[in-house]
Structure formats: C-alpha cells, structure tokens
Image: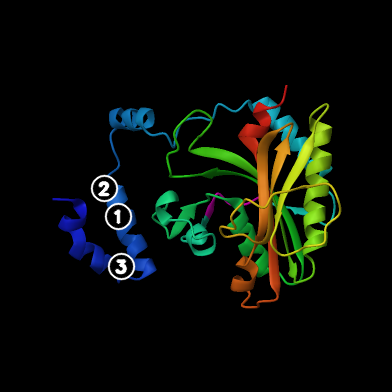
Amino acid sequence: MSWRDRFSKLQEQLSEVSDRDLQSLLLEVFAQRVPQPGYLQQRYQESRFVHPSPLNVRKSARLLAQAWETLPEPFEPIELSPLAPLGTCAGLATVSQNKVVSTGRNCEVSADPSPVLALECARRKGPVDLAAYQRVVRAQALPGPGFYAHFGIFSLVSAGRHGFEEAAIQRHWDFYRKFLESAVPDARVEFQLTNWGNLKLQAGFVPDWKRQPGYYQKACFKIYLNGVEVGDGGFTDWMARLRSDRRESFLSSGLGWERLVGLMH
C-alpha cells in the first residue's frame, strides 16, 4: 500500500487546516524526529542538499566583487533572504512545488531569485531596477556532472509600464557585456534573442526563432560567453498579475554562477 493510500484521509484533513495551525503541527512533528548524532552523520553523507559546493570560493568572491563594481545606476543591489513565501515559484513561474524545498514555516527555500525580486518590485511603487546574487536550492535531481542541488545566480530585474521594454533589455545587455568583457580576457559575448513582441532593438544580438515561449512573453534571450551558455532572461506577466494591472511589464535575467566561475582561468 502506497503512502497516498495510507494517509489519503489525513492529507485531506491537513489541506483544510489554517496556515498557522499547520505550521505549529509540523514544527511539533519535526521536534519529535530530531535524530541522534550518529544518524545525523549518516544523513549528512546521504543527502545531496547539504554537501558543500565545489565552487572555487576565492575566484567566485573576486568575480562577484567585479560584478558589483560594474553594476550601473539605476540598478539597486539588494541582499535577499534565503527563504520565500510558500508557493512563490509555483505561483509565478508555474514550476511544480515538488521541485522546490518547502519548509515547516509556510516558506520555501529560494529556487530562483527572479520571482522573489518580482515580489519586491511589486511592493515598491513606480519603475524599479534591482540586482541580487543568491544561492538557490532545487529539489529536482538532474543527471550528469555540473548539476548541483544548490548553486548561485546573479540576477537583474526591471519592472515598469508597457513601452519600457526596449530600454530595459538594453540596460541588462549593457551590464552583461561590460561585466563579462572586463572579467574574461578576449571575451566574446553574444545575445541570442527570440523576439515575439517585435521589440525594436539596436544591433548586437543573434535572432533565434526556434525557442518556444514557455512562461516568457514578448521576448527572451540567452547569454553566451565564448560559445558557452552562461545565462538567460526574458519578459513575463508576473508584475501584471502581482499589481493586477495588465499594463505592467517585468524583465528578469541572470547568470549561472558555477558555470561562469568554471570558465574563469
């Protein structure tokens, strides 16, 4: 008998419990399941979520400092919490909650800085440009080398009214080009753009009409450094949904930090 069959009635009952009561119940259950030190060591060895990253820390710190030095106005750098409200990724990015690490306090461990930055933009008024570096955790296990349960993302976001898109995407591209060219000698930076919204953009990108929209709208792009994909970005309707205004638009983009640091010599 599967756990679904054994606990189907309990699952139905818990789904009707208030957030506050469910949190109290889960905290009590977790408190009763605290293991002995010997079992803790076994858990540490077996869980892919808790192992240190193979990232070169010194190289990463130097690169991150260079990114912050390169960041222009109007982008405001902020330090995000490692937690987000429960359902942030599933509610905005339509990602399955099973791919996110949920906590017992009606929160989730951040799996992507962009949805959290969207919440922060929605909390503020007017056009907003934010930047953040965050280590995130993904519950989905991906096969092969180079895929880790936790990794870093350097993210930019811009929120504004319809009509701001061309200027916003150019700001993102200008930063990535300047940063990557300053960080990597003889860097060849390329933006591969899929433009469904007929945005009028300056030269400096390679068109790509094969990419499917997914949750992106209007336009999306990938960032290549010397032929290797290191990041991507695009427009979504997240701000329109969060502010209940169809005229709002939102651009998010980011660099995969482990991959980028691995390319540094």
Q: Residue at x 62, y 59 (%)?
A: 216
Amino acid carrying label 1: it is Glu
Could you tell me which secondary element the residue under label 1 belongs to?
helix
The overriding secondary structure of the stretch rendered in magenta is loop
> Which residues lie in the magenta part?
79-83
Residue for badge 1: 28
Image vertical order of residue 208 relative to residue 256, above or below: below
- C-beta proximity under 8 Å, tags 3 and 2: no
Distance CA(mark 3)–CA(mark 1): 17 Å
- Sequence-wise, which precedes: disc 3 or disc 2? 3
Amino acid carrying label 2: it is Gln
User: Is 220 on the left or on the right of 175, as rendered?
Assistant: left
Residue 10 pos. (x, y %): 21, 63
User: Is 82 on the left or on the right of 125, as rendered?
Assistant: left
Q: Residue at x 84, y 49 (%)?
A: 72
Quarter-wise, where is residue 67 in the image?
Answer: top right
Q: Nearer the viewer, residue 73 or 253?
A: 253
Front disc: 3 or 1: 3
- Sequence-wise, which precedes: disc 3 or disc 1? 3
Answer whether residue 153 is visible to the viewer in this image: yes
Q: Residue furthest front?
A: 210
Could you tell me which secondary element the residue under label 3 belongs to?
helix
Structural crowding at the residue carrying mark 3, measured as other residues with C-alpha within 10 Å and reported as few (<14), some (14–19) or many (≥20): few
Residue 94 pos. (x, y %): 49, 60
Residue 249 pos. (x, y %): 70, 68
The quadrant the C terminus occupies is top right
User: Is 265 on the left or on the right of 242, as rendered?
Assistant: right
Residue for badge 2: 32
81 within the magenta span: yes
